[in-house]
Image (cartoon, grey):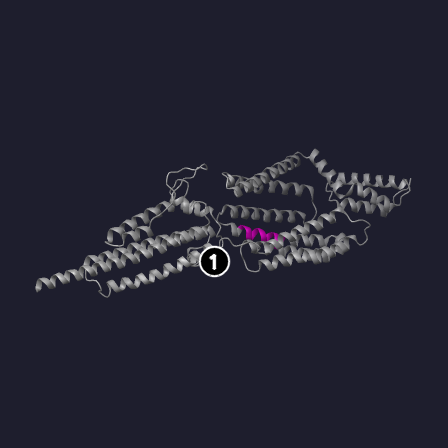
Amino acid sequence: MQDLTVANIEIIMEEVSRAGITLSHLRDELIDHFCCQVEDEMQTGLTFDKAFEKVKSILGNKGLKKVQEDTLFLIDKKYRIMKKTMKIFGVVSMSLIALGAIFKIQHWPAAGLMLLLGFSLLVTVFFPSALWVMKKESKLKGTFFIYLISIIGGIFLMIGFLFKIQHYPGAGLSMLLGYLILALILIPAILIALLRDENNKNLSVAYIIGAISMVFYLLGQLFKIQHYAGANVLLIAGAIGLTTIFLPVYAYKIFKNSENVKAGFIFLCFGIFFFNIFSFLLAMNVSTDVLRPFVIQCNENIKTTNFLESKNDRLYRTLISENKINDTLAKAKIKTVKLKSDELCEYIENIKVDLISFAENISNDDATRKAKDVSTILFKDNYDFPTYYMINKGNNGKAFELKSKIEKYKNDLINLNETGKNIIFKLLELNGTPNNIVYKDGTSSGWEYDNFYRNPLISVENTLSSLQRNVRISENEALENIANYSANNTKVSSEKSNKLNQ
């Protein structure tokens, strides 16, 4: 039987160490087993190198690692419990998230609950148990820090995704922290660990290029989600770096002396291919902006409303300040019309600002600026918060109060006018499906539901801007009607007085 030399045994010990075996007794037994297997193969006439490669292909790093996992599972009760916990809650949480996503897309009930529960289990149970298991399985220097920082970044990212989907406040900050931790701390930490490994010296250039490309890609994703400038450049730079530089360099270094192409390389190529497809789809704007007509129409309504407001202000000053009307009752009516119109338009404007402020989690000052130019609104397709704010679950949302105020304003204007009542009535008539109809999904009907239930934010803003425009048109009609009626009455009274004097 051919014996192994000291150099041969050191090669085998290095191979077992590379598998990350942390249990000292198990490591010695695996080295002994590996040596015996190699000696048996050498007994058949093979050289050490060929015998070593043959045994390595049978056992390999994964096989050795699996032996340690099985050993820990049998002898360590805590490890066994945490391992089972990680597997069970990993499956349960991901299943809940997948089902919640399907329910969310289909607008079915309980979507939010499933997403909240799934993400909560992922963050509070799966991630901590996974960290404990990984720490137990590996005691290499720097490895625990990598695991810890990856889980912290992952938790922030998962919370950010949940808050983004559910439109909770703080989503942007959580996602920002998650992406920055992964891109600027985790990727460099992994790179440093790889560069310190003596076995990876010939791959240093490839790893550096790959790490830089991944940082670009992660930052590009963050910029794209948060609508920051430069997102497309970062995404494309990351994709090109992985494809045209990292992959060729890595392939050359790994396989230049290999006889066969391994399956891992094929999977790597496919992974980068799909990775790049996703990057370019994110970077490209290939879909039609279906919300653009709402944006254009809403901005036109805002311009019309501003024009009418200025026109009505000038008319008001002419009638009141310049004493074009001497009738005290007519002046009182004009002041009332002006006051009520301003109050209603301001009330609607506050609703518009509140919707934008809460939907985008920004200050009222920023929301006020966006309300004046709705093209600057980022979350135009957000329909969850407008539905909650305008309708709410007890039919006590702002839409019901708004309808009541518009009806009262309409009746007040009609009562203040002697002429032009039909025009005002048509302008302020809130047409909708008949009230008190209950659909299969449990929702009701009426003007409020037709205009504000499950409608995107930009559509709701457009509806509110249209109402403001109609209020200003009605105000103008009422002011002119009161002024003309008063002037006609003054003229008739003057003519009657002249006849009596004659």
**Is 370 placed left or right of 283 in the picture?**
left
Q: Quadrant of residue 71?
A: top right
| One can see residue 121 in this view | no
Quadrant including the N terminus: top right
The verdict on residue 176 being magenta is yes
Mark 1 — residue? 376
- Identify the residue at the far bottom of this view: 322
Is 117 drawn above or below residue 301 in the view shown? Answer: above
Location of residue 390 in the rendering, given as x and y in whole percent from the top left corner: 40, 46
Label 1 SS: helix
| Residue 435: in magenta span | no
Name the residue at 30% across, 56% down. Answer: 475
Q: Position of residue 280 (x, y in %)?
A: 62, 55
Residue at the spot x=28%, y=49% of the render?
411
Quarter of the rendering occupied by the C terminus: bottom left
Amino acid type, residue under disc 1 in the picture: Thr
Badge 1 density bin: few <14, some 14–19, many ≥20, Cα 10 Å: few
Range drawn in magenta: 174-185
